[in-house]
Image: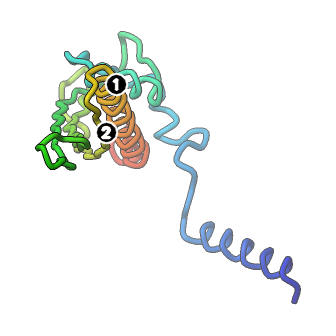
Amino acid sequence: MSLYNRRGLLAGSAALLLWGCGFEPVYKKGSAASELRGKIAIDVVRGRNGFELRERLEERLGRAGEAAPYVLTFKLDVTQTGLAVTADEGTTRYNLTGVVKYTIRNSATGIIVFEDQAKNFTAFSSTTETYPTRVAELDANVRLAQALAEQIAARIAVTAKGWHK
């Protein structure tokens, strides 16, 4: 059997296994996840990190109108920890850890239909110069918010079948 025939056989076997186990695309037409697009309003939160998280969530979930059937609220906590310290006690590397607890409520009843949390981290380097360090810190905060938003959107998509009607 040639190398190409083996690859085809393996790919075909993998496809049959996925089909046989009930696997189906999360965003296929008519799925709960695809039906949620633009139906989850996201509460406004103060602060740059909250703004970045909200913006990325709206990109992934779609902007909801005023009559959205669901509302997502979240609480974001970001902590900064020094990692690398020089001999003269200057910190040159920082870790940012973000934890976001979020809740999705039915807009009409206020009943919680889904709640969870996401956690992620990123890092940035600092220099003796203030401006480059501040730019690196801002960039790290944006990356952290985007990573958290991706986790939240993925979790909503995967679980939507269980709570979205």
Q: Quadrant of residue 24?
A: bottom right
Q: In screen coordinates, is 2 left or right of 74? A: right
Helix or strand or loop: what does disc 1 sit on? Answer: helix
Residue 100 at least partly seen:
yes
Task: Look at mark 1 in the image and give the residue it sits on.
Answer: 132
Task: Look at mark 2 in the image and give the residue it sits on.
Answer: 125
Q: Residue 108 at what x, y percent from top left?
A: 25, 20
Q: Residue 158 at what x, y percent from top left?
A: 42, 48
Question: In this view of the protein, which residue sits in the foreground, 140 or 110?
Answer: 140
Q: Where 17 sits versus 43, above or below?
A: below
Q: CA distance from mark 1 to mark 2?
A: 9 Å
Q: Quadrant of residue 64?
A: top left
Q: Where 157 sits versus 146, above or below?
A: below
Question: In this view of the protein, which residue sits in the foreground, 88 or 83?
Answer: 88
Question: In this view of the protein, which residue sits in the foreground, 129 or 162?
Answer: 129
Helix or strand or loop: what does disc 2 sit on? Answer: strand
> In which quadrant will I find the N terminus?
bottom right
Q: How many marks?
A: 2
Q: In screen coordinates, is 15 left or right of 135? A: right
Q: Residue 128 at what x, y percent from top left?
A: 25, 30
Residue furthest to the top? 66
Residue furthest to the left? 89
User: What's under tag 2, amino acid-wise?
Assistant: Ser
Residue 165 at least partly seen:
no
User: What's under tag 1, amino acid-wise?
Assistant: Pro
Residue furthest to the bottom? 1
Q: Residues within 10 Å of mark 1 (few under 14, many from 20)?
A: few
What residue is drawn where x is 15% and y is 49%? 87
Residue 26: which numbered mark, if any? none
Q: Residue 112 at what x, y percent from top left?
A: 19, 35
Residue furthest to the front? 88
Q: In screen coordinates, is 43 left or right of 147? A: left
